Image (spheres, rainbow, N blue to C red):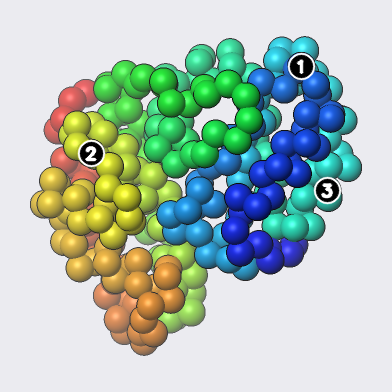
Amino acid sequence: MGKNQTDPKRLLPDITDDYKSLFGDDLVSIILYGSATGRGFRPGKSDINFMIVLTEEGIEHLDRTFDVVGKWRKRGVAVPLFLTEEYIQTSLDVFPIEYLNFRNNHVQVFGKEILKGLEFNTEFLRLQCEREIKGKLLLLRGAFVETSGKGKALKGLIIQALPALMAIFEALLHLKSMDLPGERRQIVGAVADAFGLELGVFEGLLDIKEEKSKIGEEESLHLVKGCLKEMRKLSVLVNSLGG
């Protein structure tokens, strides 16, 4: 899949025209979300993600999108999320982290602004944070053992794990009623300070993800072990917030 866009926002007029042509009045909203909104976008490596909100009638005709989705995938655009307003509103209790992340990292491209006004139940959010942290901890432990301590595999594990960790960190700041910083390193710093975590571990993970440092096998091993330790500590802290 080609990922040759230097500025995803240049795609917005053509994306909008294509989906308006497909759905007309059944197109409620087009939303750009994730790293393509500006923060953390890496041309040639990051996906470009859209949310297409349709009416209840429109969502029944996704077969209309086959050619358009294929066309844009060749230009580095991921298959969009296709939703309805009812689906969003009835999913805030089961996916609060995901929708909080959408709300914090989106650009309204067309139509009704749906995400900006979303509100979240604190206990639902805390519960998903605890579930995600504990679940990711189990997965990381298993994946860590599978690497056999090999440097390349360890770096791959870090790169795959970090996006999910950042989404959890944003939710944790919301739980603490703290403002969300604009940069990933500031988010990591705020969470480390709020929960007493070892900042250097997560900064090291970011360095690998962003290709800002080349480290050997031993240091990669140390970072992953440090991450497992801090995630275990965090699971206990989040549990203590309620439940």
* Residue 47 point in image, percent of width and height: 61, 55
Q: Nearer the viewer, mark 1 or mark 2?
A: 1
Q: Is residue 69 above or below residue 210?
A: above
Q: Give the percent coordinates (x, y) of residue 227.
A: 28, 62
| Badge 2 amino acid | Asp
- Pointer 3 with pointer 1, Cβ within 8 A: no
Residue tagged 3:
70
Would you identify the image quadrant in which residue 210 lies? bottom left
Q: Position of residue 173 (x, y in %)?
A: 24, 39
Work out whether residue 15 or residue 235 is closer to the camera in this orientation and state it: 15
Q: Residue at 18% across / 41% down in the picture? A: 236
Q: Position of residue 8 (x, y in %)?
A: 61, 54
Q: Nearer the viewer, residue 33 or 82?
A: 33
Q: Is residue 220 above or below residue 84?
A: below
Q: For residue 179, which numbered disc appears in the image?
A: 2
Label 1 – label 2 distance at C-alpha: 37 Å
**Quadrant housing residue 172:** top left
Q: Residue at x 68, y 39 (%)?
A: 80
Q: CA distance from mark 3 to mark 1?
A: 23 Å
Q: Is residue 206 left or right of residue 232?
A: right
According to the image, label 1 marks what residue? 25
Compared across the picture, whether 53 is left or right of 168 comes to: right
**Disc 3 to disc 2, C-alpha distance:** 39 Å
Q: Amino acid at mark 3?
A: Gly
Residue depicted at x 19% and y 31%: 177
Mark 1 vs 2, N-terminal side: 1
Image quadrant containing the C terminus: top left
